[in-house]
Image (cartoon, helix red, strand yellow):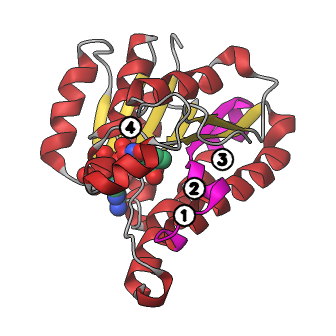
């Protein structure tokens, strides 16, 4: 990834932070992005040990002005964007009958609408450069559904459909768009689950263990590499056999 510029949203923690590190290890210059400044600066310090020219931009992906500011700043500093990893995501779990409008709206806003908006902005420079690698972080539950996660599953299933349509639109410009769909990965997001729920999920994983953010980052870097030029519109599942698509 030498010479490549990669934006990774939600890279202050969890999977996004490890993706940012992995790309920096492969010599990309990384633009880290998230909402909470303290964690973001810690993540940037880590990434700069590997890719000193990397930068961090504080931005809320649900705010259109913030997204425009990010793209303007990246173009000012680097003059291009080669790789976009749409990783920022949230859960607001509840049974459908009890789900509040806000729980639905906030999940769809962060996990789907923001990706439409940021990708639309990024496409302009990518189309001009006739190069791009877009990787969207979906989830196994986008393919399987999950009780208590109608909002989250809808956002991730929507992301898969979005990615296929995008892939078809930009393929002729040497831009690929793919999803990585993690299964059950150890991060702050899954630490919130109670032990009983974790045990129930573990019993459904043939490999008998949770995945790591490194497992996901490996798949993202594979799809974001120059050499993955002929793979587009795909969803790569990283789930220890929990679901075989
Ligand atoms: P995480 O540790 O909670 O990290 C989420 C990241 O998204 C954080 O950096 C957070 O930054 C950022 N973020 C959230 N809302 C944002 C907003 N409005 N604007 C900007 N940044 C925002 O979660 P994770 O487990 O690493 O999840 C990363 C991705 O993987 C998500 O898309 C998730 O759906 C997906 N995934 C995770 C699992 C799993 O088992 N962990 C499984 C399947 C899919 P701030 O703290 O600054 O808000």
Residue 188 % position (x, y): 26, 46
Q: Callout 3 environment at 10 Å: few (<14), some (14 to 19), or many (20+)? A: few
- Is residue 126 left or right of 3 when viewed as pictured? right
**Pointer 4: what residue?**
16
The residue indicated by pointer 3 is 124
Upstream in sequence: badge 3 or badge 4: 4
Task: Report the magenta residues as a range.
Answer: 124-150
Q: What whole-number distance in Å separates the C-alpha atoms at marks 2 and 1?
A: 6 Å
Quadrant (top left/top right/bottom left/bottom right) for the N terminus = top right
Answer whether labels 2 and 1 touch (C-beta < 8 Å). yes
Point 66% across, 47% down: residue: 124
Q: What is the secondary structure assignment of the residue under circle 3?
A: helix
Vertical side of 238 occupied by 214: above or below: above
Q: Position of residue 219 (x, y in %)?
A: 57, 26
Q: Secondary structure at mark 4?
A: helix
- Image point (35%, 49%), residue name: 198
From mark 3 to mark 2, how far is it between C-alphas?
31 Å
């Amino acid at each position: 990834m030498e010479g490549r510029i990669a934006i990774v949203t939600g890279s202050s923690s969890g999977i996004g932070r490890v993706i940012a590190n992995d790309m920096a290890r492969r010599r990309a210059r990384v633009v880290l992005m998230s909402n909470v400044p303290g964690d973001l600066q810690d993540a940037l310090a880590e990434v700069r040990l590997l890719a000193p020219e990397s930068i961090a931009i504080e931005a809320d992906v649900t705010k259109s002005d913030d997204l425009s500011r990010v793209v303007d700043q990246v173009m000012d500093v680097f003059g291009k964007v080669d790789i976009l990893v749409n990783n920022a995501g949230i859960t607001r779990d509840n049974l459908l009958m009890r789900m509040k409008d806000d729980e639905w709206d906030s999940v769809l806003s962060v996990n789907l609408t923001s990706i439409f908006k940021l990708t639309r902005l990024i496409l302009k420079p990518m189309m001009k450069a006739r190069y791009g690698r877009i990787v969207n972080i979906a989830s196994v539950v986008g393919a399987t559904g999950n009780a208590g996660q109608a909002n989250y599953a809808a956002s991730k299933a929507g992301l898969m459909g979005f990615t296929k349509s995008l892939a078809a639109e930009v393929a002729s410009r040497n831009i690929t768009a793919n999803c990585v769909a993690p299964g059950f990965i150890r991060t702050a997001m899954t630490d919130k689950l109670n032990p009983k729920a974790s045990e129930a999920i573990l019993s459904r994983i043939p490999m008998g263990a949770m995945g790591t953010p490194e497992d996901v980052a490996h798949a993202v870097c594979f799809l974001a590499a120059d050499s993955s030029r002929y793979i587009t519109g795909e969803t790569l599942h990283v789930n220890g056999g929990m679901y075989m698509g």
